[in-house]
Image: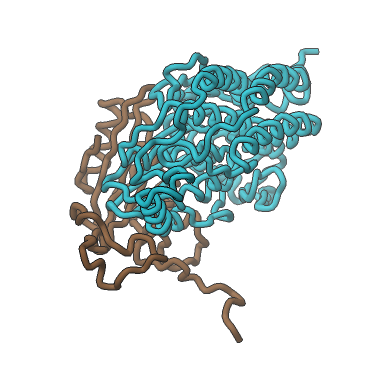
Amino acid sequence: MTLVVDPARLVDACMHLRDDEGFSMLADITPTDYLDWGSRGTAGYFGTAAGRDLNSPGSQGLPRTPEPKAKRFSMNYHLVAVPGAQRVRVQVWLDEDESVESVISVWPTADWHEREAWDMMGIRIEGHPNLTRLLMEEDWEGHPLRKDYPIGGEPVRFSEET
Amino acid sequence: MALAPERPKIYEGSRIPQPVPTILRVPEDLRDSEDVLEINFGPNHPSTHGVLRLVIELHGEDVVGLRAVIGYLHTGFEKNMEQKSWWKAITYSPRIDYLSFQNNELVFVLAVEKLLELQVPEKATWMRMCLAELNRIHSHLVWLATAALELGAISMFWYCFRERDSILDLFEMVTGTRMHTRYYQVGGLAEDIPPGFFPEARKFCGWMPKAVDDYETLVDQNAIWLERTKGLGLLSAEDAIALGQTGPVLRGSGVDWDLRKASPYLAYDQVDFDVPVYENGDVWDRYKVHMDEMRQSTRIVVQCLDRLEQMEGQPWIADDRKVVLPPREELHTSMESLIHHFKIVTEGFRVPEGEVYVPIESARGELACYVVSDGGPKPWRVKFRAPSFVALEATATCMTDALVADLIAIVGSLDTVMGEVDR
């Protein structure tokens, strides 16, 4: 089950889910970037504009246009009622310049998950006491899991001919 | 003389550090003291289980400050998987957790199958369960071997690796590879179970419980082992849940929660096994959970073998030609099979649009895969919920009032695999 929550009321919603509905554990936070979602276009009789490239999987496009998304980023909070099996996904939609409240006060485990969301996706977390990079180096530029972050964007030493 | 010191009772209230739950801060009265020494533990220390760096502050032998620095093994698995077709991405998943690789492979395949709403043949389900449990034993053996080695029980390392090797031999027999097997295919298994697997696996299952008894004989009465594990690294049930702990860490803290029982996947509702739970939340109890789980896993493997032996000749992979490769021999005679084979290999199969979160119980706890598909042949987003990543968050809480020598035992008991932490 997915609950879409207004970012401004996220902490209230989480408090309610934890205290009144028994979702005692935050299993994971999964931020997702939907930039250019569905822009690959659908496959048609003529293929795509770029033509048919067999070495690039998916060059034929999608079978149909996917449902448009509300905003660029989604933050998904996967909750579970321990000890039990009931699960719920709390979803928050954000644009690039929007930030989301930290849920660290509700579940302390959110600490690293939120730092990872910032590090990898560049999602600003308001009220996090230690919002620094987690996996990448401290002086890293950019957020690697964003869709506009190129793969192979990092210069590789000694790879160029001199 | 009593073998072990009186063990401290599990604490009341919460010990999670404030304001940052994963950082232990030097107490106010020691902050200006010149006796506090900041040292780096790792990233290249042998008992950091990979490349974990802990910045610790010592006051004498007491650890008064601690913060973990991770990311040294970050390889961008999730980003890479977005660039690959679904069936190429399977290759990445076992490499994330290199000790519990079958489980990682399984969770990704299960997530894709859930999006595809694909029915998997019974034989594949049971074989997956059999291998997942063998893999759990494998992972626990490596954990026990290295954790004991760090506490000075070197012989344990050789004994555990002996059994580990027989498990790897079984994997090699079935899949052709010892680690990172890539044996699970979307829809079932890549190949049928080879002849000769069952007797070998039964031989192993006959031996394994005795081996676990042997391990316990080695250390259970050992005064050093008892002193270095009992009453250390305490984590209460409330704190464990608040910190998102799962698997042996949670069950060592007295919470009876195992996904195999709570929300059975594969065919775990059809096998008979117990979930070991211990109450004290210390290193010893986590060790005990691991030992008991190895016995229980052996029980499950035996039941899987019983069922699998009766499934001789049954299909091991689903018969959906849009997703599953056609049988090799058909390629010479059937044009349609050739086309399907070509399309799946070059472009990959398409997975319907949607998002799923599939959790399973890996050797380290709740391992989950969150997958988003836009309907194309490549995943839009893959995110692994790594149990070790979360387990490492509990280090600061477990290290409250601990000595520097205990650090090794405590970090070891959380059973982290850095490949999975950093992904």
Q: Colour of chain A?
A: brown
Front residue of this view, candidates A73 and A22: A73
- B143 lies above or below B213: below
Q: Position of residue B256 (x, y in %)?
A: 46, 19
Q: Which chain is cyan?
A: B
**Residue situated in front as seen by the camera: B397 or B265:** B265
Residue nearest the viewer, comparing B265 with A105? B265
Q: Which residue is located at x 53 percent, y 56 percent? A: B75
Give the image's coloring scheme. by chain
Where does the image place residue A51, in percent across and percent down from the top left?
A: 30, 71
Please say whether residue A129 is visible from this viewpoint: no
Q: Residue at x 26, y 57 (%)?
A: A62
Q: Residue B348 is drawn in which quadrant?
A: bottom left
Q: Quadrant of residue B290?
A: top right
Q: Residue at x 77, y 13 (%)?
A: B2
The residue under the point 25% across, 26% down is A20
Instruction: Name the quadrant of the N terminus of chain B.
Output: top right
Which is nearer the eye, B207 or B96? B207
